[in-house]
Image (tube, helix red, strand yellow):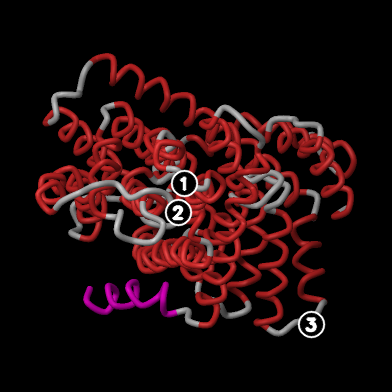
Amino acid sequence: MIATTLIVLLGLLALAVPVAAALGMLGLVLEQIYGRFPLSLAMGELAWSTSNSFLLVAIPFFVLLGEILLRSGIAERMYSALVQWMPWLPGGLMHSNIVACGLFAATSGSSVATAATIGTVALGEVERRGYNERLFLGTIAAGGTLGILIPPSINMIVYGVLTETSIPQLYLAGLLPGIVLTVLFSLTVMVACLLRPDLDGTRVPTSWEGRLRSLPDLLPPLFIFAAVIGSIYAGLATATESAALGVIAAMAVAAWHRRLTLEVLRAALEGTMRTTAMIMAILIAAYFLNFVMTSIGLTAQVNRSITSLGLSPFELLLVVIAFYIVLGMFMETLSMMVATVPIIAPVLITAGFDPVWVGILIILLMETAMITPPVGINLYVVQGLRKRGRIDDVMIGVSPFVLTLVLMIAVLVVWPDLALWLPRSAATAG
């Protein structure tokens, strides 16, 4: 049963069937082969119950927030301000790419949106400043992955819904690892440019006057982050309500800069509808697949297979990490989360691992999958923005950052308090 599932899934993905359709078709195939009842009759109820979740309403809000920042030019102003502060480091503007991704991640909740937004405003600098194109592209693809680790995060919401884990605790748990990973990405660039100076580009001329003048353009992401995260921990809003507050804050910032026009709103709403429709299609198909797998006993069979291995908790953890790294090479991350977390997370939690810590570990593994060939979605986002050359360039450029993510996963495994210290401190203070 397990072998049939993997063969059918990989076959559908190899045929370039859209992810949502592939998951739904896999559910129908498993139903026809192993189902005793017409499970497909439950699809309407599953679609309604999935899309009717109050927590999932936060997803279109966060997508809209990011769209407003992009369409109104606020993201471009933020990047231009960072350019004034980063040129002295080995790697120059490549550090601006990573830090800009980190700041935008604190508002958007999406890795794809983060990579697309920063890539749109940064790619013109490659030839103008003479940077090594491969490494420059790699910083955008890797930096974009921060979108699902630094709160707020759409993937954390999905994990919280699937495992009934506190979203505010997940947000707190992702903050320190997000900052540490941002620093590690920058250190990766610095080491690469020190070892190979030809990877670096020409410095952007700047002055303290220009830096100080650019500071107001760095404030909008911090203002929006405070509105979203601050409202949750001040007890003023739920995770979903805070996402709506974030949209209001983004609109206020756009209006302050006199960029909140009907054209901007129309483009932002269109982009939000397209992205939300794609996400919800994947969620509905994945929920149907989970329902089928549970009904035919596949979920219980996987759990029994894992338990029968007689692994220690640490050995089990290594197997799960290896499983996600391999699966991430072939499967889109959101669908992979929805399809596997209901099976894998309970096994890890039963083995004694904290559910919040498991959530951050899985998010880091999803980040790795986003830049792992051949299916890493951020690779294709960056290549799509580039509109020339081969995707091999992006894959080569991002390879050092894959190793950095593996190092970050190792750090989290060795030092769990990196993720758990803030949630525990908040619980104690509360």
Horizontal side of residue 120 vs 396, given as left or right: left
Residue type pointed to by label 2 = Asp
Residue named by callout 1: 131
Give the residue at x 28% y 20%: 264
Residue named by callout 3: 310
Horizontal side of residue 14 vs 340, given as left or right: right
Give the residue at x 27% y 49%: 82
Give the residue at x 11% y 51%: 212
Q: Which of marks 3 and 1 is nearer the N terminus?
A: 1
Label at residue 203: none
Q: Earlier in the sequence, mark 3 or mark 2?
A: 2
Q: Does the magenta stretch include residue 420?
A: yes
Q: Earlier in the sequence, mark 1 or mark 2?
A: 1
Secondary structure category for the residue under label 3: loop
Label at residue 200: 2
The reply to whether residue 156 is visible in this rendering is: no
Q: Quadrant of residue 38?
A: top right
Q: In which quarter of the image is residue 32?
A: top right
Residue type pointed to by label 1 = Tyr
- For the stretch drawn in magenta, what is the main secondary structure? helix
Label 3 vs label 2: CA separation? 50 Å
Residue 326 vs residue 246, the one in the foreground: 326
Q: Quadrant of the C terminus?
A: bottom left
Q: Give coordinates of residue 105: x percent, y percent.
A: 37, 49
Q: Give coordinates of residue 203: x percent, y percent.
A: 33, 50
Question: Where does the magenta region start and end?
Answer: 417-430
Secondary structure category for the residue under label 2: loop
The reply to whether residue 399 is visible in this rendering is: yes
Residue 195 vs residue 23, the one in the foreground: 195
Residue type pointed to by label 3 = Gly
